[in-house]
Image (cartoon, grey):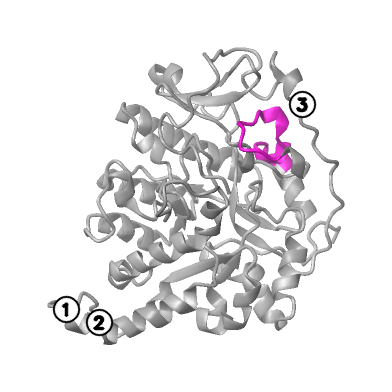
Amino acid sequence: MAKAGQGPGAWAGPGAPRTGPGSGDAPGDGEEARTVTLLPDPDPRPIRVPVISVDDHLIEPADLFEGRMPAAMAESAPRIVEFENGQQAWQYEQNLYPNIGLNAVVGKAREDWSMDPARFSEMRPGCYDIHARITDMDLNGVWASLCFPSLVAGFCGSVFSRSKDQDLGLACVRAWNDWHMDVWAGTYPERIIPLELPWLADIELASAEVLRNAERGFRAISFPEFPSRLGLRSIFSGAWDPFFAACAETETVVCLHVGASGWAPLPSPDPPFELFPTLFPVNAILAAAEWLWSGVALRYPDLSIAMSEGGIGWVPMLMDRADYVLSHSASGTDSVTWKSDLLPSQVLGRNFYFCSIDDPSAVELRSRIGVDHIMVESDYPHADSTWPDTQAVLDATFGHLPDDELRAIAAGNASRVFRHPLPDRDDWRQPA
């Protein structure tokens, strides 16, 4: 949920950092003053239908880059540093990237939630340990998960792609992807959908990496919803077409996560924090509108675009408005850019997929959105997360639907678009 701190140098830190013992999972000298009590494990939740969560997050473990960087770059790789007051942060190219507290609150009492940087020992192990994550997925009734990165990489690898040392940045992207495939997804391949980070600094190389990673089994890629906000070529420029061609060719789903570009629609300079997550759907509708009118989906009709953590309530409004604009306002322009017999709403319903965490008011509009294009998320381990009650939230919002619709939204659509298998029985936790 919390997206603060994605930019370089976003956190100055409490004094000079130190490395060494206590820089990773183990407690450091300053931890005694920062004790956070994790709640006991919840009871396993009843499973009505299997769930595939298409928006979760991982907290990169302290040893992620160890043994995965070229030898000459090993000392320059991101590393965990610790401060005398017990706080920890990732350090990369002289910038600090803390694990913001609200990014890892599952299993904590509400009174312990905060924006303060969190230590690994203050997090539930499922945040960063794949074995513990699978346990937490089982407790929650989530069969499979698509996991985005955290702040040290940026949600779309933007931190590494903007590195001062571009060779180092590329090595970091490749190391992150190697770890994700080998450890995070590779340890339990039936439970984790492999998501790669792109190399945004070079479109030709980024396209080649998509082809290479697809052969390794990656099913999705995290991409900035507004590339121009990162100083990259805009979605309207056509420059990214080789990249999108590679994604379409390999059936790699382009995931546009809210906040991946480090931008939010905040017109006032001094809003309260609550406004930021309130406007996640506004970010999503702006992104979907830009990508729709860019014509990318017209040029690549087989491209799948997933709107991550954006909700679904705005989708019918965008469909209606875009169709109306095409037949009205756009008719007065010198050159209509929409070159298709399809309506904009039809392209949204063909190429775009939408993600719901809890949208009870939008359920009755599901047919307009497209039942086969709605997916769900648990957002583990962020403050928005429905863990450990994702099954209960799903049942409250969608449980009254016909069984085929409920199953499609809960897991079937995600299984199809991400090409990930479903379990052979509803409650996979029990012996066959």
Callout 3 amino acid: Thr
Residue under label 3, please give it. 35
Q: Position of residue 102 (x, y in %)?
A: 63, 42
Q: Is residue 162 above or below residue 231?
A: above
Do residues under tags 2 and 1 come within 8 Å of each other at their CB atoms?
A: yes
| Element class at badge 1 | loop
Q: Residue 268 or 295: which is nearer the viewer?
A: 268
Residue 248 found in image quarter: bottom left
Q: Residue 229 or 133: which is nearer the viewer?
A: 229
First-in-chain label (2 vs 3):
3
Q: Is residue 27 magenta?
A: no
Q: Residues within 10 Å of mark 1 (few under 14, many from 20)?
A: few
In this image, 429 relative to 302: left or right?
right
- Residues shaded magenta: 113-132
Residue under label 1, please give it. 333
| Element class at badge 2 | helix
The C terminus: image quadrant:
bottom right
Q: Position of residue 163 (x, y in %)?
A: 34, 31
Residue 231 found in image quarter: top left
Q: Is residue 270 above or below residue 122?
A: below
Res. 78 visible in picture: no
Residue under label 2, please give it. 329
The span from disc 2 to disc 1 (Cα, nearest Å) is: 8 Å
Q: Position of residue 273 (x, y in %)?
A: 55, 47
Callout 2 amino acid: Ser
In this image, 45 relative to 12: left or right?
right
In this image, 203 relative to 50: left or right?
left
Q: Position of residue 73 (x, y in %)?
A: 40, 20
First-in-chain label (3 vs 1):
3
Residue 251 found in image quarter: bottom left
Q: Residues within 10 Å of mark 2 (few under 14, many from 20)?
A: few
Label placed on residue 413 = none
